[in-house]
Amino acid sequence: MGSKKRIAAQTRKEARKTMYFASLKGCPSSPRKMRYVVDMIRGVEVDRALGILRFSKKAAAYNVEKLLRSAIANWETKNERRAEAGELYVSRVFVDEGSTLKRMRPAPQGRAYRIRKRSNHVTLFVDSKNNTEKIEA
């Protein structure tokens, strides 16, 4: 590995130590359906986001709720303390397209229709409100 790449990798690694996130890879639902759920909780306080996801009728909400709980646990592990009520919020969350399984479905007159079974990758960042106030000041 070249020296520039090594230095860039080290700075990225140091920056990740102050980030609190969780990622879900290969979730078997389309990215479009997942983005509907993710848009509901972006920028929302963590306790409120858990409530929104808990009572959502979307099937993808279960996976996002599990991911949010994982991100909260990661924050608590790195800070070595429990998160207080109203302290954390969902700072960033994005959905990327994963691999697509291509399948064939029989069709009339000897033809076949293609079925695309999509998957996605979700990355969710949480941050404390106190941390952002320190940065802005």
Image: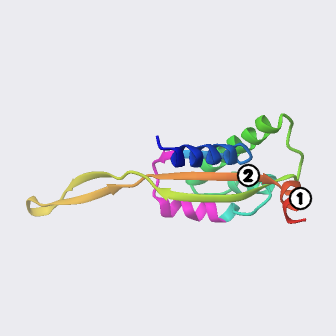
Helix, strand or loop at disc 1? helix
- Mark 1 vs mark 2: which is more N-terminal? 2
Helix, strand or loop at disc 2? strand
Furthest-left residue in this view: 109
3D distance between C-alphas at marks 1 and 2: 16 Å
Which residue is at 52% across, 47% downward? 5
Residue 66: image location, x then y, percent: 65, 43
Tell me the kind of residue under disc 2. Answer: Val
Could you tell whether 61 is left or right of 133 in the image? left
Furthest-front residue in this view: 3
Question: Residue 52 lies in what quarter of the image?
Answer: bottom right
Q: Does the magenta-highlighted stretch encompass residue 27?
A: yes
- 107 versus 2 height, above or below: below
Which residue matches tag 1?
A: 134
Which mark is nearer the camera, 1 or 2? 1
Question: Residue 72 lies in what quarter of the image?
Answer: top right
Q: What span is in magenta?
A: 25-39
Q: In this orientation, which residue lies closer to the viewer: 89 or 27?
A: 89
Q: In this orientation, which residue lies closer to the viewer: 79 or 82?
A: 79
Q: In this orientation, which residue lies closer to the viewer: 65 or 100?
A: 100
Residue 82: image location, x then y, percent: 86, 38
Which residue matches tag 2?
A: 126
Could you tell whether 52 is left or right of 121 in the image? right
Could you tell whether 137 is left or right of 28 in the image? right
Q: Does the magenta-highlighted stretch encompass residue 62?
A: no
Which residue is at 66% across, 48% downward? 65
State how many labels appear: 2
Residue 105: image location, x then y, percent: 22, 55
Q: In this orientation, which residue lies closer to the viewer: 132 or 3?
A: 3
Which residue is at 68% across, 52% downward? 125
